[in-house]
Amino acid sequence: MIEKIEPIFKERLQMIELENKYITPVEMEQLNHDILVSMLPILEPYKSMEGNKIFDVDRLIDQKLINFLSSDDKYATQAQLFSNNPNYNRALRSACHNALVNPNFDINQPWFIDHSIERRNYELFEDIAKPLLTNDAYYMKFTTPGFMDLNIEIIDENRLAIAHNFELNGDLMADPDVEFTVDKENRLLYPQTYQQDTLQIYERLDGNPIRTNELNQFMNQWFNNITDQYYVIDKVYSENFELSKKENPSAMRKFCKEHDIPWMCPASKELER
């Protein structure tokens, strides 16, 4: 009896673990690309009816997905995730909705990677601190009037930290500090830890899907704020040199221009304008 039950138990345990884990965009692509390919002809007859002629597009997509996933045992994992993992459900429904309404939908592109918040965060970070992604610097400091300095540095291979810092009784405080890893091949950014010393918070995500999603959203807003608050590069450290905007502004502007981020070190007149 144990021999019969154990494989079923292990299979169910793996499914429970999968339902409650953070699924990366790369894993989403692996799980769903074939499903999306198969859904295209199923949705094709409804493309001309899109808009007011379809009473409820989301309901239509849900029905078609449920019918398809339940039609083949090889999609048992995806069917279980669709019913029990909100992030998975939302991503698959969004992909099908885009395939239905977007005349330029390209099935040959990795939709789940290209449309993920992890990709958007990578692109936002690239616009701020590209030299850290190309290993042309290991530390960058940013400043702007009225806000705390911003520090970003490489702390390990493909692992970086971004933080606002201040001193309290001689101690360096994080307000906040986030460590994240970078998938350069797929252009994705993954948060790993969150630290807020003023609230005595230190948290490792360890694949928690809810907290990972929340921190992804937080970092997206943070990166946008860096641009909106007109942060500029103040210092750059690399293995071969150190640059300071105050001491050598022309060299800093040249460095930023060479690394495709000239807006992070504008001339004084450009900044005033």
Image (cartoon, helix red, strand yellow):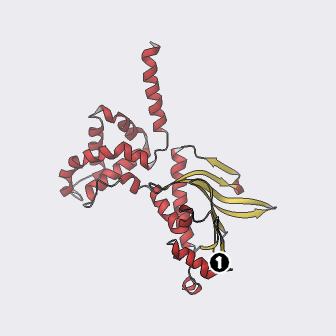
Residue 243 left/right relative to 119: right
Quadrant where the C terminus is found in the figure: bottom right
In the rendered image, residue 254, in percent from the top left (x then y), is placed at 56, 78
Whether 99 is drawn above or below 75: the answer is below
Query: Which residue is rendered at x = 67% and y = 51% of the image?
Result: 201
Quadrant where the N terminus is found in the figure: top left
In the rendered image, residue 184, in percent from the top left (x then y), is placed at 48, 56
Query: Count of labels shown?
Result: 1
Residue 209 left/right relative to 46: right
Query: Which residue is rendered at x = 57% and y = 85% of the image?
Result: 272
Look at the image and tell me whether residue 146 can be seen.
no
Residue 20 left/right relative to 177: left
Whether 195 is drawn above or below 65: the answer is below
Nearer to us in this view, 193 or 260: 260
Look at the image and tell me whether residue 99 can be seen.
yes
Amino acid at circle 1:
Lys
Whether 13 is drawn above or below 265: the answer is above
Which image quarter: residue 255?
bottom right
Nearer to us in this view, 132 or 66: 132
In the rendered image, residue 5, in percent from the top left (x then y), is placed at 44, 18
Residue beneath disc 1: 245
Query: In terms of secondary structure, where does tag 1 sit?
Result: loop
In the rendered image, residue 76, in percent from the top left (x then y), is placed at 35, 33
Query: Which residue is rendered at x = 57% and y = 79% of the image?
Result: 253
